[in-house]
Image: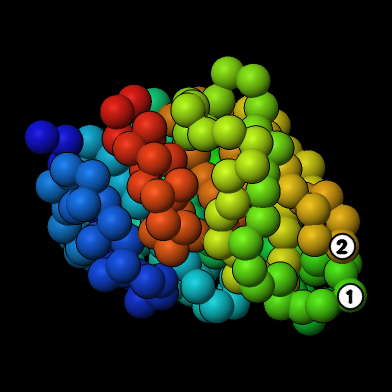
Amino acid sequence: MKTLVVLDYGSGNLRSAQRALERIGAQVSVTADLEAARAADGLVVPGVGAFAACMEGLVGIGGGAVIAERVSVGRPVLGICVGMQVLFDAGVEHGVETEGLGVLRGRVEPLHAPVLPHMGWNTVAAPAGSTLFAGLDAATRFYFVHSYAVHETDGLVATTVHGEPFVAAVEHGPVSATQFHPEKSGDAGATLLENWLAAL
């Protein structure tokens, strides 16, 4: 059985992520233990709320260094929502720029849309060759809650539109990340998590 760590740095829907991963057959621990985070087959980085607060929490437990270390040696990391956003170079909220972890190229910036936050179900245009979206058709919907987004990055990029196009998910080397919440996306989210788990 694959072992997963959901990193507890004071932000994120930790238990819902844990339950969703356990339902697909993973052995999951929710912990701030950095040695466990290093050793796990897969590391899940959740996140809700503000970019700056999430970064402060990550830095506070030394989590950023462990994430960067895993990426540098090709060990899988999955970022969810703000846990995805902190993987990028920087985030801009209310005119204030905060440095991110920089394991993915790009900036998290305000989403330009008539209604914010973006809250609800969207289809996602998945790239050819995607591991995460294997077996999911174009009509599949995922659950989003956010007001900030990345508009451009490297790797296999899935996109959606709310006011403007933005990055819904990215796969780049050992890093996978979703702006939406797979743990709140029902069967579609379960399939995506199963696909990630199977690739570990």
Amino acid at dot 1: Pro
| Disc sitting over residue 40 in the figure | none
Residue 163 placement (x, y as % from top left)? 87, 62
Q: Secondary structure at mark 2?
A: loop
Residue 199 placement (x, y as % from top left)? 34, 25
Q: Image quadrant for the C terminus?
A: top left
Residue at horizontal 43%, vertical 35%? 71
Q: Nearer the viewer, residue 105 or 182?
A: 182
Q: Image quadrant for the N terminus?
A: top left
Q: Quadrant of residue 105?
A: top right
- The answer to whether the residues at label 1 and label 2 have Cβ atoms under 8 Å apart is yes
* Residue that badge 2 annotates: 163
Q: Nearer the viewer, residue 104 or 124?
A: 124
Q: Secondary structure at mark 1?
A: loop
Q: Quadrant of residue 52?
A: bottom right
Residue at horizontal 87%, vertical 56%? 164
Residue at horizontal 38%, vertical 32%? 195
Residue 36 placement (x, y as % from top left)? 16, 50
* Residue that badge 1 annotates: 114
Amino acid at dot 2: Gly
Residue 183 horizontal side relative to residue 147, left or right: left
Residue at horizontal 40%, vertical 50%? 187
Looking at the image, is mark 1 or mark 2 earlier in the sequence?
A: 1
Residue 71 horizontal side relative to residue 149, left or right: left
User: From mark 1 to mark 2, how far is it between C-alphas?
Assistant: 6 Å
Q: Nearer the viewer, residue 160 or 81?
A: 160
Q: For the image shown, how many numbered marks are present on the structure?
A: 2
Kindly tell me whether residue 59 is visible in this rendering: no
Q: How is the image coloured?
A: rainbow
